[in-house]
Image: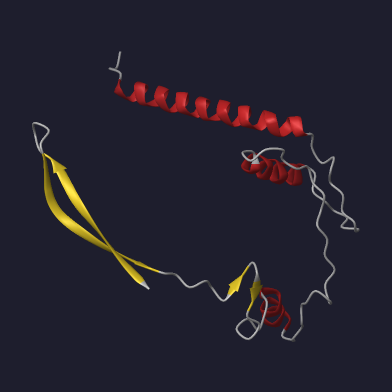
Amino acid sequence: MEQLVKLQMFAVAAGGAERTVGELSISLRSLQPPECTEQGCDRTTVTKSYLQVEWEVRRKTPRLFSCDSMRSCSCRVPQQDNSSDCGLYLLQYVESFLQNPVVHFDLPLRLESWFPRQRVRQKREEIRTLILRLHQNQRNKENHKTSPSR
């Protein structure tokens, strides 16, 4: 199924009068979902995982990576309590990991107390302060370049 949408383009001339300057046609095709989605994967098309290919390239031997052959866990980490702090939490996860990396991966890996929630709330203010400081530095440099020499 394909829909065709026509848009009229307008221009505003001096004096505020609008006039039509042309038409633009856009085709909206119904998109088919990909073969692999969150709901499942067509196993006939996906034959190797990234890990399998990487193993074969580096080790020159085949190896099957599956749920049965690999242990995994979901780490418990500090969680956001709203729908707007995901980026701040991501930045804090990275910063916390770089400052104090996990070196023992004994399961279950528990990082609930990795950093306090208040630390993430401070991150927004730190980023704001940094942006304002960089902006001010940039303005000072521009003013210095344009000011007459004494």
78 and 57: which is toward the camera: 78
User: In the image, residue 123 lies at what x, y percent?
Assistant: 66, 32
Residue 18, image quadrant = top left
Task: Give the residue displayed 10% in from the left and 38% down from the top.
Answer: 13
Q: Is residue 37 left or right of residue 31?
A: right
Give the position of the N terminus as an image quadrant. bottom left
13 vs 34: above or below: above
User: In the image, residue 146 lies at what x, y percent?
Assistant: 30, 23
User: In the image, residue 134 lies at what x, y percent?
Assistant: 50, 29
Q: Looking at the image, which residue sits at the far top? A: 150
Task: Give the residue displayed 68% in from the left and 28% down from the top.
Answer: 122
122 vs 53: above or below: above
Q: Is residue 102 left or right of residue 135?
A: right
112 and 93: which is toward the camera: 112
132 and 25: which is toward the camera: 25
Task: Give the residue displayed 36% in from the left and 26% down from the top.
Answer: 142
Number of numbered markers: 0
Give the position of the C terminus as an image quadrant. top left
Residue 92, image quadrant = top right
Q: Is residue 89 left or right of residue 128?
A: right
Task: Give the residue displayed 64% in from the left and 67% down from the top.
Answer: 38
Q: How is the image coloured?
A: secondary structure
